[in-house]
């Protein structure tokens, strides 16, 4: 594959919090149109790595490139405008806003200006400006018809889906998903898996962090496993999960 096919390049990235080496020298490339997975037990540094990529935490060392351009010094706000969207490990919807308004805020994160400031100035302008992006995001995530509902009235599974819609609404070229199926039942998890696969068919490159081994094997094109901030295995998902180091990290063997 040529370098132009690399959407996200991570090279020797480390994030240390005092003496804690949360992430300690991770390198990988994510190819366009693929789902790249990160598997690892609690505390292995997965969320910290996503925070480094979205510039929410400073790097101790290493380089980040997006479509060939270094961006390790770019602010979190500018990362969204570059075309990198994310969902968080816990639901972060605004409870007093409707589904439409929550998703519209996402659309605005990718726009030149707006976001919370626009919301304070008036919801109407925000909703008008982002109408098409919001409608498309809701359609792509199977949420059409729920526009006027508040998140608290939706099932947990649907709330998480709204979060994905909010990220999609900014038309990202890379979507980072931090445990999108955490706390879900089996059928909700399967719904998310099919949604992510559908988004891949539509061309969306994804970085997926999950606990669920079977889901990762079913969903990802490439998988890495992390433990204690370092990469312990990398390759085809079905091979990675069989590696003794990965089995040991998971099962304590
Ligand atoms: P994971 O997402 O894989 O469960 P995290 O990235 O959340 O792991 O955490 C990795 C390690 O870094 C853990 O030991 C965690 O306690 C530590 N850590 C994460 N964020 C901070 C922080 N802001 N300050 C200090 N330590 C942190
Ligand atoms: Mg985490």
Image (cartoon, rainbow, N blue to C red):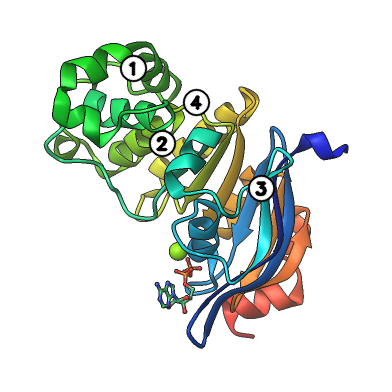
Say which quadrant the C terminus sits in: bottom right
Q: Earlier in the sequence, mark 2 or mark 1?
A: 1
Secondary structure under tag 4 reads: loop
> At 56% across and 49% down in the image, what residue appears?
208
Which residue does the image show at 40% across and 17% down from the upper left? 133
Of the image marks 2 and 4, the number of the one nearer the N terminus: 2
The answer to which of marks 3 and 2 sits earlier in the sequence is 3
Q: Earlier in the sequence, mark 4 or mark 1?
A: 1
Instruction: Decide if residue 41 is on the left or right side of residue 108.
Output: right
- What is the count of numbered marks? 4
At horizontal 20% and vertical 36% (from top left) the residue drawn is 151
Distance Cα–Cα, label 3 vs label 2: 17 Å
Q: Position of residue 13 (x, y in %)?
A: 65, 65
Residue 142 position in % (x across, y down): 39, 23
Question: Is 6 placed left or right of 119 in the picture?
Answer: right
Q: Is residue 126 visible?
A: yes
Q: What residue sits right under mark 3 in the picture?
A: 36
Residue on which the image places disc 4: 171
Q: Which residue corresponds to mark 2?
A: 164
Which marked residue is nearer to the observer: mark 3 or mark 1? 1
Query: In screen coordinates, is 235 left or right of 250?
Result: right
Q: Which mark is residue 130?
A: 1
In the rendered image of this protein, does residue 97 appear above or below residue 92? above
């Amino acid at each position: 594959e040529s370098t132009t096919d690399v959407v996200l390049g991570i090279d020797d990235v480390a994030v240390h919090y005092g003496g804690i080496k949360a992430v300690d020298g991770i390198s990988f490339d994510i190819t366009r149109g693929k789902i790249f997975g990160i598997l690892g037990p609690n505390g292995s540094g997965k969320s910290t790595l996503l925070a480094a990529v979205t510039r929410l935490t400073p790097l101790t060392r290493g380089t980040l490139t997006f479509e060939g351009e270094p961006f390790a010094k770019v602010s979190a706000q500018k990362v969204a405008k570059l075309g990198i969207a994310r969902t968080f490990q816990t639901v972060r919807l605004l409870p007093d806003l409707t589904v439409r308004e929550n998703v519209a805020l996402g659309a605005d994160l990718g726009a030149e200006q707006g976001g919370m400031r626009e919301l304070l100035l008036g919801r109407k302008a925000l909703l008008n400006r982002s109408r098409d992006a919001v409608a498309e995001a809701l359609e792509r995530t199977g949420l059409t018809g729920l526009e006027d509902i508040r998140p608290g009235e939706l099932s947990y599974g649907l709330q998480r889906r709204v979060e994905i819609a909010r990220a999609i609404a900014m038309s990202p070229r890379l979507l980072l998903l931090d445990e999108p199926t955490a706390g879900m039942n089996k059928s909700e998890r399967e719904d998310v898996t099919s949604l992510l696969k559908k988004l891949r068919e539509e061309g969306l490159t994804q970085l997926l962090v999950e606990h669920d081994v079977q889901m990762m094997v079913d969903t990802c094109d490439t998988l890495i496993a992390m433990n204690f901030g370092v990469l312990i295995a990398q390759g085809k998902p079905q091979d990675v999960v069989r590696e003794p180091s990965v089995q040991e990290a998971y099962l304590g063997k």
